[in-house]
Amino acid sequence: VRIFRTIKVASHFQKFKDLSETLIKALKQVSVYMLLMFIIMFSYSILGMELFANNARVDSNGMADFKNGFPFDASFDYFLDSFKTVFVMLTNDNWAYVFQIHSQTTNMTASVFFFFTWIFIGQKIVLNLF
């Protein structure tokens, strides 16, 4: 409730109005890219679940160990984990390690296809956005 009071008081300032209008215009223009990015991230999350669900396991040293390991943080076991992993890979945050673990525990061809196409497509869209 207090935030609305702050916005109401701030709306009396012309610069704040100009800033708000510019922000709304920018969000309208970016919304198409955001929707496209969401659809592609959703698709890659589902594809990642199909290819890699319940396959990536690591030991206490962070090395791939399918038989005795425990679930990997950046896994595709559940949809939210998969969506988070796809987002983290989009930001290029340690994606090579995620690729290494999944390629060692699953099919190498599927891993190469999935990870490199996602990095290429995702980065192309993000670079066009900014």
Image: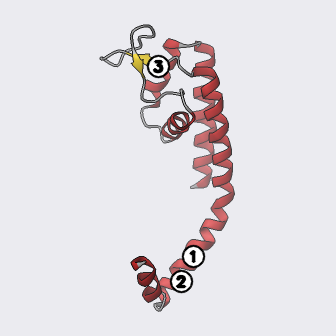
Nearer-N-terminus badge (3/1): 1
Residue lying furthest top in this view?
Answer: 67
Q: Amino acid at mark 3?
A: Gln
Q: Amino acid at mark 2?
A: Asp
Marks 3 and 1 sit apart, C-alpha to C-alpha, by: 43 Å
Residue 22, x across and y down, in percent: 57, 76
Q: Is residue 75 above or below residue 80?
A: above
Camera-side residue: 13 or 67? 67
Residue 16, x across and y down, in percent: 47, 83
Q: Which residue is mark 1?
A: 22
Mark 1 neighbour class, 10 Å CA radius: few under 14, some 14 to 19, many 20 or more: few
> At numbered mark 3, what does the secondary structure look like: helix, strand or loop?
helix
Q: Which residue is mark 2?
A: 18
Name which residue lies at 60% across and 73% down.
24
Camera-side residue: 96 or 39? 39
> At numbered mark 2, what does the secondary structure look like: helix, strand or loop?
helix
> At numbered mark 1, what does the secondary structure look like: helix, strand or loop?
helix
Camera-side residue: 27 or 3? 3
Name which residue lies at 51% across and 79% down.
19
Asked whether the beta carbons under mark 3 and mark 1 sit within 8 Å of each other, the answer is no
Q: Amino acid at mark 1?
A: Thr
Residue lying furthest front in this view?
Answer: 1
